């Protein structure tokens, strides 16, 4: 079942990829990224390895690489066509690379990253506990995970089927996020409202 859901999601985002960075999407994500970056504190003078899970067309990593000259980033995504767009728009080779893979089985070493990010992609993952376990595994001690996603809409609970996006999407309250993090050994440091129902939760390894 999980494989079927992920395959359906991949097909949807493959079709969307050529037009993903349209005006409305770009404006929305620029606003989210700007607010997210105000809560990030990475070293500017030391090499810093970061991971963007569900990186899409790579906009966040490019923006971070512009702000942090020593940053070395990897973008992970299921969609080959999203990754093609990300590679074509990569303004910071070789500091940024983009690889295909699933968030539940990341192709990375233990303790590889100082920071990990998931921006409006966690809602697509059918096995959130596995994703948190993988994030905990690839983070260095004292590393941070920044989870940016929608909180539940009133009356809809934690799951809603959205036609056209490849299957169910999942929304987690701050308390549910904290429980997921704790199950993987990640402590929730704080929650911040970024834009409407979009909430940033910061976890520490």
Image (cartoon, rainbow, N blue to C red):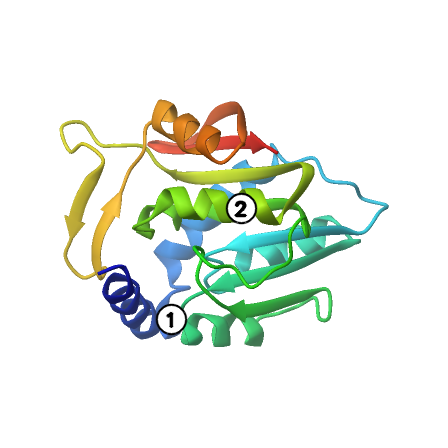
The x, y position of residue 152, in whole percent, is 26, 32
Residue that appears at 56% across and 39% down: 145
* Left or right: 36 as drawn, with respect to 42: left
Disc 2 is placed on an element classified as: helix
Is residue 75 shown above or below 33?
Answer: below
Residue that appears at 42% across and 64% down: 21
Quadrant of the snapshot with the C terminus: top right
Q: Can residue 28 be seen in this view?
A: yes
Quadrant of the snapshot with the N terminus: bottom left
Quarter of the rendering containing residue 179: top left
Mark 2 or mark 1, whichever is nearer to me: 2
Residue bearing mark 1? 17
What is the total number of numbered labels drawn onto the structure image?
A: 2
Disc 1 is placed on an element classified as: helix
Quarter of the rendering containing residue 40: top right
Residue bearing mark 2? 135
Residue 85 is tagged as: none
The x, y position of residue 124, in whole percent, is 32, 52
Is residue 55 shown above or below 88?
Answer: above
* Left or right: 77 as drawn, with respect to 157: right
Is residue 70 shown above or below 91?
Answer: above
Between residue 12 and residue 159, name the one nearer to us: 159
The x, y position of residue 197, in whole percent, is 33, 32
**Distance Cα–Cα, label 2 vs label 1:** 25 Å
Q: Can residue 31 be seen in this view?
A: no
The x, y position of residue 92, in whole percent, is 70, 66
Give the crowd class for mark 1: few <14, some 14-19, many >=20 residues within 10 Å: many
Residue that appears at 32% across and 27% down: 173
Residue that appears at 68% across and 52% down: 112
Q: Of marks 2 and 1, which one's residue comes earlier in the chain?
A: 1
CB of mark 2 within 8 Å of CB of mark 1?
no
Between residue 31 and residue 156, name the one nearer to us: 156
């Amino acid at each position: 079942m999980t494989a079927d859901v992920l395959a359906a999601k991949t097909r949807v985002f493959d079709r969307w990829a050529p037009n993903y960075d349209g005006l409305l999407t770009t404006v929305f994500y620029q606003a989210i990224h700007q607010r997210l970056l105000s809560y990030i504190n990475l070293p500017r003078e030391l090499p810093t390895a970061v991971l963007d899970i569900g990186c899409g067309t790579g906009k966040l990593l490019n923006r971070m690489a512009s702000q942090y000259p020593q940053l070395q980033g990897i973008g992970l995504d299921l969609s080959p066509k999203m990754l093609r767009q990300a590679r074509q728009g990569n303004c910071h080779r070789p500091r940024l690379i983009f690889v295909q893979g699933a968030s539940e089985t990341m192709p990375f070493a233990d303790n590889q990253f100082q920071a990990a990010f998931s921006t409006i992609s966690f809602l697509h993952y059918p096995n959130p506990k596995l994703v948190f376990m993988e994030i905990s595994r690839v983070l260095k001690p004292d590393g941070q995970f920044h989870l940016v996603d929608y909180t539940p809409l009133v009356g809809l609970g934690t799951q809603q089927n959205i036609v056209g996006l490849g299957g169910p999407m999942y929304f987690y309250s701050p308390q549910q996020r904290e429980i997921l993090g704790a199950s993987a050994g990640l402590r929730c440091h704080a929650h911040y409202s970024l834009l409407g129902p979009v909430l940033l939760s910061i976890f520490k390894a």
